[in-house]
Image: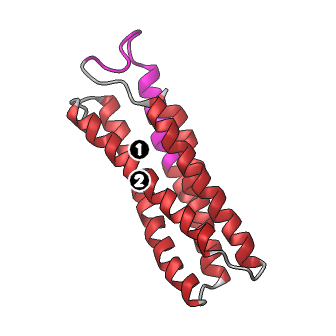
Amino acid sequence: MLGMLVFIVTEVMFFSGFVSAFTISKANAPMGMWPPPGQPMLPAAATLVNTLVLLVSGVLLFLAYRRFRAAQPSVALYTGAFVLGAAFLALQGREWVALLAQGMTLTSSTLGGFFFLIVGTHALHVVACIIAMGFGFLRLRRGTMSREYYLAMLAFWTFVVAAWPVIYARVYF
């Protein structure tokens, strides 16, 4: 667990650096030049739905952990958290495809570069946690889930879920 907490602290610093650099770049853009010419507006309204999906996933995993700790494991709550996490990832993927089709790429502008770097890095964290949740699902079904594994995974997912609203608020608006 200590290792996971140290990892999370380093990731908070990592994302803080990226978001700070993005915020500075955006603030230094000439008046009326954000988003850069030729770049699409980010789909903030659609991404709000994604955000709610991710937040509900975090709540479900927390509730599943509470049940697990009380010796009443809930595969249904755990599965709900897993499915909603995967849905968030799929919705983000659909958003990326739409932005790429509109000409926004990693190299098309400062906005594109920061967007794909920050949101993409977050997506990699989601993928890593979804994989960990998949292994956890197998352990939970077999009755071999350890409290330590569950708690470390919950801490990582909580970080991923908590980081997203900050990223969403800073990058999409």
Q: Residue at x 57, y 52 (%)?
A: 161
Q: Mark 2 — residue?
A: 89
How many residues crowd around disc 2 within 10 Å: few (fewer than 14), some, or many (20 or more)? many
Q: Residue at x 55, y 84 (%)?
A: 141
- State left or right for residue 36 relative to residue 136: left
Q: In which quarter of the image is the N terminus?
A: bottom right
In this rendered view, identify the residue nearer to me: 135 or 72: 72
Outermost top residue: 31
Q: Residue 10's mark?
A: none
Q: Is mark 2 on a helix, strand or loop?
A: helix
Badge 1 amino acid:
Ile
Q: Which residue is drawn at 73% across and 73% down?
A: 67
- Mark 1 vs mark 2: give the one in front: 2
Outermost right residue: 70
- x then y, percent, for residue 27: 47, 21
- x then y, percent, for residue 140: 58, 82
Badge 2 amino acid:
Leu
> Which range of residues does the magenta coloring cover?
15-37
- Quadrant in the rendering for residue 160: bottom right
In this rendered view, identify the residue nearer to me: 10 or 162: 162
Q: What's the CA distance linking mark 1 and mark 2?
A: 14 Å
Above/below status of 149 relative to 103: below
Is 30 one of the magenta-colored residues? yes
Q: Mark 1 — residue?
A: 118
Above/below status of 79 relative to 23: below
Q: Sequence order check: which comes first, mark 1 or mark 2?
A: 2
- x then y, percent, for residue 60: 64, 61
